[in-house]
């Protein structure tokens, strides 16, 4: 890292089965939630028995996202979980794993593929995983519109959601929202007035 110029970092990119290269990138190595962003309260629809038996932070996060339809809310389209923990091979990269894969449709009938990366605890989201997810969708689902998503716990009941795209050959963050899972009775009229005014 000491050899990287200011504002840049080195990362390892997979270029095929058991082949890697060092790449100098601009920006930051890890994706972190914007601490200035407002938090949106969402009625928590996660069944209590599911919460009780969720095994890991990552699994608990994916469960919260699924039961509360956070992908639908975040993107404004109807989404369905297609497969989780998908392991596959991508040309030019090698083997990859995507935490969950969603498909979706909007009011115009357009169809989407959404790869989702999830991080709980102290794990950090990396650019490489997003890059691999986008390439997976380009190769395996070329007829669908790819919207690459990541989610991360900020606290045990606040989830940061991110959407990414490719711009000039690099991964950029297109959208970010923070959702707080809360009992519906705790969402006040003032909260709703605030949401309605935006």
Image (tube, helix red, strand yellow):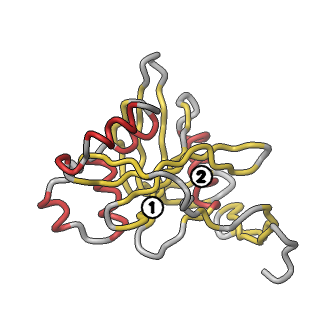
Q: In the figure, 52 relative to 88: above or below?
A: below
Q: In which quarter of the image is residue 35?
A: bottom right
Q: In the figure, 2 relative to 27: above or below?
A: below
Q: Residue 170: horizontal and vertical position, in percent? A: 74, 50
How busy is the neighbourhood of tag 2: few (under 14 within 10 Å), some, or many (20 plus)? many
Q: What element carries label 2?
A: strand
Nearest-to-viewer mark from 1 and 2: 1
Residue at the bottom extreme, as displayed? 2
The answer to whether residue 9 is left or right of residue 113 is right
Q: Residue 21: horizontal and vertical position, in percent? A: 77, 69
Residue at the front extreme, as displayed? 190
- C-alpha separation, residue under disc 1 versus residue under disc 2: 25 Å
Q: Which of marks 1 and 2 is nearer the N terminus?
A: 2
Q: Check disc 2 and report the residue beneath it.
A: 90
How busy is the neighbourhood of tag 1: few (under 14 within 10 Å), some, or many (20 plus)? many
**Residue at 79% across, 66% down:** 23
Q: 115 and 151: which one is in front?
A: 151
Q: Quadrant of residue 28?
A: bottom right
Q: Residue 119: horizontal and vertical position, in percent? A: 45, 65
Q: 94 and 117: which one is in front?
A: 117
Residue at the left extreme, as displayed? 49
Q: Residue 13: horizontal and vertical position, in percent? A: 70, 65
For the question of whether residue 38 can be seen, the reply is yes
Q: Check disc 1 and report the residue beneath it.
A: 152
Callout count: 2
């Amino acid at each position: 890292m000491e050899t990287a110029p200011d504002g840049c970092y080195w990362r390892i990119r997979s270029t095929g089965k058991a082949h890697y290269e060092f790449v100098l990138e601009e920006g930051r190595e890890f994706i972190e939630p914007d601490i200035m962003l407002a938090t949106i309260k969402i009625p928590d629809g996660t069944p209590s028995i599911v919460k009780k038996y969720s095994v890991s932070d990552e699994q608990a996060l994916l469960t919260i996202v699924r039961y509360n339809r956070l992908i639908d809310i975040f993107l404004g389209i109807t989404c369905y979980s297609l497969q989780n923990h998908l392991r596959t091979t991508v040309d030019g990269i090698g083997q990859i794993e995507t935490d969950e894969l969603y498909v979706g449709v909007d009011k115009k009938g357009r169809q989407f593929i959404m790869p989702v990366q999830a991080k709980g605890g102290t794990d950090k989201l990396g650019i490489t995983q997003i890059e691999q997810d986008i390439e997976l969708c380009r190769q395996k689902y070329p007829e669908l519109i790819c919207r690459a998503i990541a989610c991360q716990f900020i606290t045990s009941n606040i989830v940061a959601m991110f959407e990414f795209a490719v711009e000039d050959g690099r991964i950029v963050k297109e959208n970010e929202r923070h959702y707080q899972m809360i009992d519906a009775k705790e969402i006040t009229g003032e909260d709703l007035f605030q949401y309605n005014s935006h």
